[in-house]
Amino acid sequence: MLIALAGNPNTGKSSLFNAITGAHQHIGNWPGVTVEKKEGIITFEGKKITIVDLPGTYSLTAYSLEEVITRNFILEEEPDVVVDVIDATNLERNLYLLTELMELTDRIVIALNMFDEAKRKYKLDVKKMKELLGIPVIPTVAIKNKGVKELLHACLHGDFTPKKFYYPEDVENRIEKLQGIMEKLDLKNKRWHAIKLIENDSEVRKKFANLGRKDILHEAEHLRHEIEDIYGDDIETLMASFRYSFAHGLFHEVAEPLNVGGVTITDMIDHVVAHKIFGLPIFLVIMYLSFEFVFVVAAPFQDAIDLIFNGKTLPSGQHINGLIDISYHWMASFIPAWAASFINYGMLRGLAAVLTFTPIIMFLFLILSILEDSGYLARVAFLMDRLMRKIGLEGRGVISLMLGFGCNVPAVMSTRALKNERERKLSIALNPLIPCGARIQVFAFITAIFFKHNKALVMWSLLLLSMAVVAVLGYIYSKTIFKGKAEPFVMELPPYRVPSLKGIIIHMWEKSEGFLRKAGTIIVGAAGIIWLLAALPWGVKFGGENSYIGQIAHFLAPVGAPFGITPESIIALFFGFFAKEVVIDVFYVLYGTKEAMLAAMTPLQAYSLLLFILFYTPCVATLATIYNETRSIKFVIFVILEGFALALLFSFLAYNIGSFMGVGG
């Protein structure tokens, strides 16, 4: 049996998915795209059930990749049941998506999530809602695991006699006429296709164009103009208003508001944290405290992992061998020394570097999960929306920039949701300036070594500088090469709630697991390549000036001098072009120990390097995505030059001003 979970963002859909599947879930990507795909397999009442968590979306138009994925899955895969996860505290708004789901499938179960909070806001008549819709409606509180078994039982045994959602007669007649023309076509759900053609849906129009049915496209266009002439408005506005009217009517049939005009806890908190003046400073303080927490708590775990792999030199001068040294001496007894060195001081040391900084990554994702699940990050998007609107970006553009803190690839792809081509290109141009998760990992690595007493402050300064540069450049771009004003956008602010421990742990592990998977492939493999460059040609000193990597470093030394960037750092930056995390492994292979790194660079040089990494060209995957989205090699070159120009500027200023003032030596 196949069950799909659909719903708006911030409805608790992920919490419900976690409550149902627990540890029995798999995280990947949808075929051909980087949008996350979650699946879980469970057994309930003796039946094997596959649960698919569809991307969160407000509607099923073709404006964003998430919307297309959701509707195509329901249309093509025909799940046995679609669970529409509704935030019961925002019932009327969430019912809009239901109207579109009812056009795609008859087998819908509604999960009225956050029902405990909703009962303080409305008096909800669940029984009447079931009768009016003809489908099961189950109250749930996902973070407390309430209603989950009842929901699954309804999916297996529910009574599905759905009431159809009909448009006004003038519209229905034209839908039926177009549907009749399609009668002989091999299409699933002809009514839905007819509706989408009348709505001028780009994806569906493309499908019929590929079928060679221009006659149907022309008829749909004719019928669309007739409807627009009758009602005196564009088709998109009309169809949306018909659906909202249904949602509005249903809401008032089943919900009776309580405490009208009362001030909620959410209102009181928002009065402070979402304040137009104090909101942004509060966010910056929260991020600083978050970084401080991450570094302080992660430090003992890092030291333990470092001790296990690299050993420790005691104050007396005696060295306690770690796993790498022990493994090398053991292997060298039965295989060539170079092979033992490659395995241990190349591959294993690369893995050790990654594992040493995994605690920082895990605790960072832990904090971000708490902030997200509590509803605070939605406020951050709201606060940033105010700022970004001044530089010509609307709310969806702000959201795509926020996604960049995770990974720039899906963030760039998310700009498809922007209807305005100017804003889309502006958002793509600014996105690589947002430090992605991979860059943050490198920042954590370098700051932990060179800034033991100011780690959080250094990380915070990088975040602050990134935001400032995005704001300034965005303003300049919007007045010059991307002229125009932002379109209006309504942003939903979910109520604050206490995150569930289970949900936080799952979210933290999902993100950390991705980091570890990458460490096991690209990063450790790159460490092996770096070792070979440091060891060849045979007979030279490892990493010495006569090795291949030493020769490259010698050649590059004058390039980095004005910026305080060492030759080894330039090599690391080069390999970081392929994947930013590889920078960590390059340093570990070339320097071997933290002490060697400290001897090779001053804190000022390290900070100059951090600034360069913050801005210089994004990874190959991001550049490929930018090309796919713009189909312009000139735009890709512009992004590369933009990044390098900023990296060179800030790195040069920081190093030379710092040297002049005698700072960080």
Image (tube, helix red, strand yellow):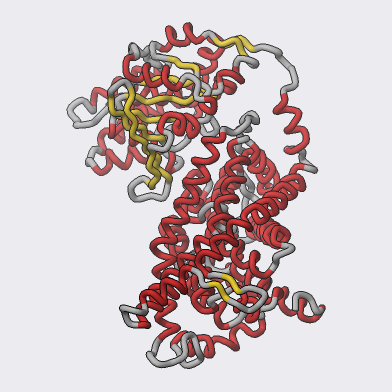
Vertical relation: 256 (above or below) 361: above
Residue sticking out furthest to the right: 661
Vertical relation: 123 (above or below) 15: above
Q: Name the residue at 77% across, 77% down.
A: 657
Q: Where is residue 285 drawn, in percent x and y?
A: 75, 49
Question: Between residues 482 and 143, which one lies in front from this camera angle?
Answer: 143
Vertical relation: 465 (above or below) 564: above
Q: Where is residue 367 drawn, in percent x and y?
A: 62, 45
Q: Name the residue at 73% across, 59% down.
A: 457
Q: Name the residue at 64% across, 15% down.
A: 120
Q: Quadrant of the C terminus?
A: bottom right
Q: Quadrant of residue 175?
A: top left
Q: Where is residue 38 drawn, in percent x and y?
A: 40, 40
Residue sticking out furthest to the left: 184
Residue 573 seen in this snapshot: no
Residue 449 seen in this snapshot: yes
Q: Quadrant of the N terminus?
A: top left
Q: Where is residue 252 drawn, in percent x and y?
A: 56, 11
Q: How many marks?
A: 0
Drawn side of residue 81 relative to residue 607, left or right:
left
Q: Quadrant of residue 540?
A: bottom left
Question: Between residues 67 and 502, which one lies in front from this camera angle?
Answer: 502
Vertical relation: 546 (above or below) 265: below
